[in-house]
Image: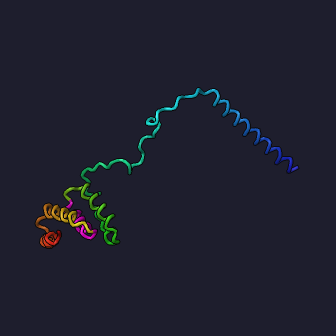
Amino acid sequence: MRQNLYMARLLILAALAGGLWAQEKKQDAVLPKQDPKPAEEQLPPEEDAGAKKQEYTFNPVRSKRDVQVGDFYLKKGDFKAAVARYKEATLWNEGNAEAFLRLGEAEEKRGAPKAAKAAYQKYLELAPEAKNAPEVKKRLEKLP
């Protein structure tokens, strides 16, 4: 008895599946074939935010956050990542003297004296009266 019930259910499911399959085939036959679009029209719009070029507007909060993340990488010894975050911070706020100072330090540790020199010069331009300005000037003189 139970076996007959299972067989009946199985036959019903098979019939339903066959009916759906036949219905799909009928719809395919009814729809007219469309010409494929040229390759450039088939491409989806760019959805990856990382692939778009970043537009920077004044954002001191984002700049400060990037400096903090750069400090994290600098402490870990990942100088390349630290440099990237400090550069990002300077793009969000071109007047962020701390970002330029840290960028100079990271570039110096990374072994890029020219980039470090440029960052230190920008720092001194933004904060000529800072407490550590004499120290930064000495570092600047030591760089090739």
Q: How is the image coloured?
A: rainbow
**Residue 3 versus residue 40: which sits nearer the camera?**
40
53 in the magenta segment: no
Q: Position of residue 123 (x, y in %)?
A: 17, 63
Q: Which residues are magenta?
A: 96-110
Depicted 141 relative to depicted 52: above or below: below
Q: How many numbered marks does the figure carry?
A: 0
Could you tell me residue 84's position as x and y percent?
30, 61
Is residue 18 left or right of 84 when viewed as pictured? right
Decide whether the magenta segment is chiefly helix, strand or loop: helix
Q: Nearer the viewer, residue 43 or 21?
A: 43
* Quarter holding residue 79: bottom left
**Is any atom of residue 106 visible in this view?**
yes
Q: Residue furthest front?
A: 144
In the displayed structure, does residue 128 sit left or right of residue 23? left
Q: Residue at x 63, y 26 (%)?
A: 30
Give whichever of 125, 2 is nearer the camera. 125
Q: Is residue 99 highlighted in magenta? A: yes
- Quadrant of res 134: bottom left
Give x and y (percent) for residue 94: 21, 56
Q: Residue sitting at 19 percent across and 57 percent down?
A: 95
Above or below 32: residue 110? below
Return the residue found at the far right.
Answer: 1
Query: Residue 28, located in which quarter of the rendered image?
Result: top right
Left or right of 125, for residue 57: right
Q: Residue at x 79, y 45 (%)?
A: 10
Residue at image coords 71%, 33%: 22
- The answer to whether any part of residue 101 appears in the image is no
Expressed as whole percent of the image width and height from the top left, the position of residue 142 reads: 16, 72
